Image (cartoon, rainbow, N blue to C red):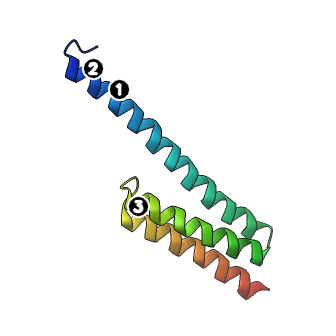
């Protein structure tokens, strides 16, 4: 444990930020799973709706620096490919 006051404050701040980032990362993963569940259920309308909300969450997470912008683009691209494949089979 740190003894210096500023170091103690840094510990508090970094823990608070870690929990906030963890929450944002969890929200991102939940949204992605929602799209994948709708795709598995072969419900195109629900998948498209879930994709729309997931894209905004993915973008905001990338803007905040929680994930890299290329990772965000990769997630969006793969989810979109799942939805396009769903439309082709229907």
Circle 3 sits in a helix, a strand or a loop, which is it? helix
Residue 47: image location, x then y, percent: 71, 72
What crowding class fits label 3: few (fewer than 14 Cα within 10 Å), some (14-19), or many (20 or more)? some
**CB under 8 Å between discs 1 and 2:** yes
Looking at the image, residue 71 sits to the left or right of residue 11; the answer is right
Residue 27: horizontal and vertical position, in percent?
57, 51
Residue drawn where x is 61% and y is 72% of the image: 52
Disc with the residue nearer the chain's start (1 vs 3)? 1
Question: In the rendered view, does 20 fall on the left or right side of 4?
Answer: right
Q: How far apart are marks 1 and 2 (CA)?
A: 6 Å
Which quadrant does the C terminus fall into? bottom right
- Tell me whether the residue at label 2 lies in contact with that at label 3, contact meaning CB atoms closer than 8 angstroms: no
Image quadrant in which you'd find residue 67: bottom left
Which callout, 2 or 3, points at the residue further toward the start of the chain? 2
Can you tell which mark lies on residue 8?
A: 2
Which of pointers 2 and 3 indicates the residue nearer the eye?
2
At a point 73% along the width and 70% down the height, the residue shown is 39
* Distance between the alpha carbons at the discs numbered 1 and 3: 24 Å
On-image quarter of the N terminus: top left
Q: Looking at the image, is 6 positioned above or below residue 49?
A: above
The residue under the point 72% across, 85% down is 87
Distance between mark 2 and mark 3 Cα atoms: 29 Å
Image coordinates of residue 23 in percent, x first then y, are 52, 43
> Disc 1 designates what residue?
12
Asked if the residue under mark 3 is in contact with the one under mark 1, i.e. CB atoms within 8 Å, the reply is no
- Residue bearing mark 3: 62
Q: Write the residue at 45% across / 58% down.
A: 61
From this view, report whether residue 70 is shown above or below residue 10. Answer: below
- Viewer-nearest residue: 64 or 82: 64
Report crowding for label 1: few under 14, some 14 to 19, many 20 or more residues within 10 A (C-alpha): few
Q: Is mark 2 on a helix, strand or loop?
A: helix
């Amino acid at each position: 444990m740190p003894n210096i006051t500023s170091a103690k404050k840094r510990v508090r701040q970094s823990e608070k930020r870690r929990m906030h980032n963890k929450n944002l990362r969890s929200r991102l993963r939940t949204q992605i799973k929602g799209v994948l569940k709708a795709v598995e259920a072969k419900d195109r309308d629900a998948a498209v709706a879930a994709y729309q909300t997931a894209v905004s969450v993915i973008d905001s997470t990338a803007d905040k620096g929680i994930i890299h912008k290329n990772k965000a683009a990769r997630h969006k691209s793969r989810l979109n490919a799942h939805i396009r494949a769903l439309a082709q089979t229907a």
